[in-house]
Amino acid sequence: MTTTAPTTVVNAFLKAFEDGDVDAALTFVHPDIVWRNPRLPAIRGKKLAAVVFSPLRGIVGFGVVTHHSSVDTPTPGRPVVRNERTDYLRVGGVETSFHVSGVFELADGLIIGWRDDFSWPSLFRGAFSKSPRPTDTQWLAPRDPGDW
């Protein structure tokens, strides 16, 4: 049996979001995923995650630059990937960038737990500043509405 490195799974998951390919992103998601963001209710289960991810099909632009990743295995068979990254979001003409500390827990090679920690004020402040953009601006390109 071939296994994929945990960081490869997480990076491919985030890359699928950058590409606006929600279906590809969902191939890396465990049916029992729990996704947590600060001060928001947890998203539980792959079906609900698919609904929440759907704006990435062209309505919301997403980009990511990962600065550091590490892998730990506190429980056998359940590796945890921690990353420090900058996320970039675009909604209409408003763009923002902000620092994120992500924690991804894998089970059976799929993401079963995902927690992003970030500052909401930082997210909103980025929309009103001239923050640096990723050098690859493919994520900013408008998508064909037929792909939604």
Image (cartoon, grey):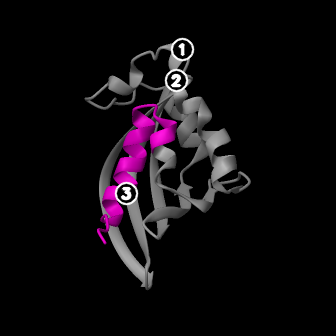
Q: Position of residue 137 (x, y in %)?
A: 32, 24
Disc 3 marks a residue whose amino acid type is Val
Judging depth in this view, the residue of 108 and 130 nearest the camera is: 108
Distance in Å between CA atoms under marks 1 and 3: 28 Å
Asked whether the residues under the numbered discs 3 and 2 touch, taking CB atoms below 8 Å apart as contact, a structural biologist would say: no
Q: Position of residue 32 (x, y in %)?
A: 63, 63
Judging depth in this view, the residue of 19 and 67 nearest the camera is: 19
Q: Which residue is disc 2 drawn over?
A: 58
Any part of residue 93 in sight? no
Q: Which residue is disc 1 drawn over?
A: 145
Q: Position of residue 74 (x, y in %)?
A: 44, 83
The secondary element bearing badge 1 is classed as helix
Distance in Å between CA atoms under marks 3 and 2: 23 Å
Q: Which residues are magenta?
A: 1-24
Disc 2 marks a residue whose amino acid type is Gly
The secondary element bearing badge 3 is classed as helix
- Magenta stretch containing residue 20, yes or no? yes
Asked whether the residues under the numbered discs 1 and 3 touch, taking CB atoms below 8 Å apart as contact, a structural biologist would say: no
Judging depth in this view, the residue of 131 and 13 nearest the camera is: 13
Seen in the image, is 139 located left or right of residue 26?
left
Which mark is drawn over residue 112? Answer: none
Q: Main secondary structure of the magenta part?
A: helix
Distance in Å between CA atoms under marks 2 and 1: 7 Å
Q: Is residue 59 above or below residue 1?
A: above
Judging depth in this view, the residue of 21 and 96 nearest the camera is: 21
Q: Which residue is disc 3 drawn over?
A: 9
**Rendered residue at 40%/22% (across/down):** 140
**Rendered residue at 35%/51% (across/down):** 11
The secondary element bearing badge 2 is classed as loop
Crowding around mark 3 (Cα neighbors within 10 Å: few <14, some 14 to 19, many 20+) is many
Label 3 or label 2, whichever comes before in sequence order: 3
**The N terminus, quarter of image:** bottom left
